[in-house]
Image: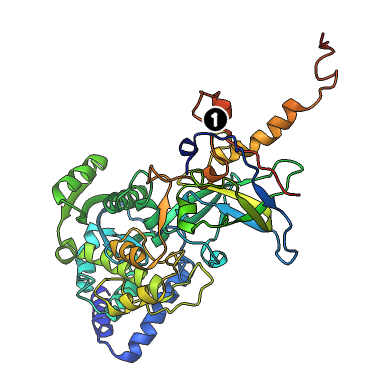
Amino acid sequence: MTSEDSGSNVRSVRDIVNLETDQENKPEHLHLLPCAISYDGPAKAATYFIPEKKPDSTYEASFRGRQLCGRKITLPRSYIGHVVIESMPHGLSELAFENDVSDTASDQRELRSVAQIAGLTVWEHDTAPLENDDEFICALEWIDTAASIHADCTSEETNGAVIVEE
Amino acid sequence: MKSMLGKHTDDELETTTNVKRVKAADSLQVFRELQMPIPGVLAQSYTFFSPHQAASEEYVLGVDEAGRGPVLGPMVYSACFCPISAYVHLKSLGFADSKQLSEDQRSKLFARLQTEEHAGWAVRCISPRDISQCMLRRTKYNLNSLAHDATIQLLREINQKANIRQVFIDTVGPPASYQKKLQQLFPSMEITVAKKADSLYPIVSAASVCAKVVRDAHLENWVFAEPLEVSRVFGSGYPGDPNTVRWLRESLDPVFGYPSIIRFSWSTCTKLLEESAVAVVWADEDEKHTKLTSKWFGGASNRRTRSKFFSRRPALILTTSL
């Protein structure tokens, strides 16, 4: 399931993402934990997962006895986050689907939004994720960076220099 | 005066259920007056020093612990100290190994200790949450190190308040190497580390009484940090205690495991979680583990080497149906 397995990160088939969120579902604060939990469904998070803010604006919490250190993430400007669940492509067992997506006949994935994201905290074990090193934080940072380098520059920004294409 | 007080204490040690009820409340009263966090949520470890007027004399000090073995609750290290000249008197109060004393006797001896003018005591109370977190760090920090560090911290801080000469410590691990380690750290003290020190040296017994009273008070008045409705009959925390066994079986949450009273690093706990809770694989413990992010933040292709700037920001573009 890693990128190395799939051989390419260019997706030839368009994935389907349905972002029509059910109005009943309130935006949720998400926690990205540094572990895989073999469970999908409701959990008593509000009871057991109690983050505490530290003086340096990072957070601390415990999960299964381990200390987690977290950093709150702001989403890129003008973007909205969604919690999505994935629908099984037709004719695929869940097992085959989970094992390897890229080897199946249909490369198309279907996602459906179940709630909007009100906020997001990225957690690491023992030490808080670094803003310039955590994979997830950096991936989001790329969105703003990409927008900046593709935006038109004003003459002020280019310090008066004008590039003329011949 | 001293002998009168000593006799008074002997009388008090005769137990009746009535006295016991009064005495248990007395311990809480002592904690309240000392402004110790009992009862209360014990999330963070803390160190407490009894108010103490140091004499200029040389002191004798003992260190012992309570709650090293059980799967739940705090581990409490205690030091008790008095001027060497007052040690004979302290011995006469009837301190013995805390396990040989009844809860009521411990409670009375603890209350009695508060009235000793020159005797002082201190506790380092390590919360079960901190025990779990320390033992489950990426770089493991084991229980012996935790115990040694608690003892060293107590010795260091008391040494600034009183002239500590003789030190008796119940051993954690092999006594010889532990004694050598402590002796090097505190060259001005005469340190004796021994097995069963709590039954050999009354000053260690006194420390063991303080540790046990503090641990028991925390458990009897435990306030769960989690807004839970679970049974409070969790027993002693030893695997042989049927109350503990039942509580562990009945209070298990399939996702989160247990509230933070439990030491997650204990094999009693890890076995139960393995059997009855959902599997959790930690990213830093399993190299094959794929981060959740990699499913959609799929990472760079390995066809050509990309600039590190891009490989560190592995976002993929999805097309929406909107």
- Compared across the picture, whether B51 is left or right of A41 comes to left
Query: Where is residue A40 drawn, in percent x and y?
Result: 52, 62
For the N terminus of chain B, which image quadrant? Answer: bottom left
Residue A97, visible in the rendered structure: yes
- Compared across the picture, whether B288 is left or right of A25 comes to left
Q: Which residue lies at the image location 69% right of the left edge and 43% below the top edge?
A: B319
Query: Where is residue B167 drawn, in percent x and y?
Result: 22, 53
In the displayed orientation, state which residue is furthest to the top.
A166
Display coloring: rainbow
Q: Which residue lies at the image location 26% right of the left edge and 66% below the top edge?
A: B208
Mark 1 is surrounded, within 10 Å at the Cα level, by few (under 14), some (14 to 19) or many (20 or more) other residues, namely some
Identify the residue under disc 1. B311
Quarter where residue A41 is shown: bottom right
Pick the front one: B314 or A43: B314
Query: Where is residue A30 drawn, in percent x and y?
Result: 61, 54
Pick the front one: B223 or A13: A13
Query: Where is residue B281 drawn, in percent x and y?
Result: 41, 52
Pick the front one: B217 or B35: B217
Quarter where residue B51 is shown: bottom left
- Compared across the picture, whether A104 is left or right of A121 comes to left
Identify which amino acid the numbered label 1 is placed on. Answer: Ser
Residue B127, visible in the rendered structure: no
The subunit carrying tag 1 is B
Q: Is residue A131 above or below residue A40?
A: above
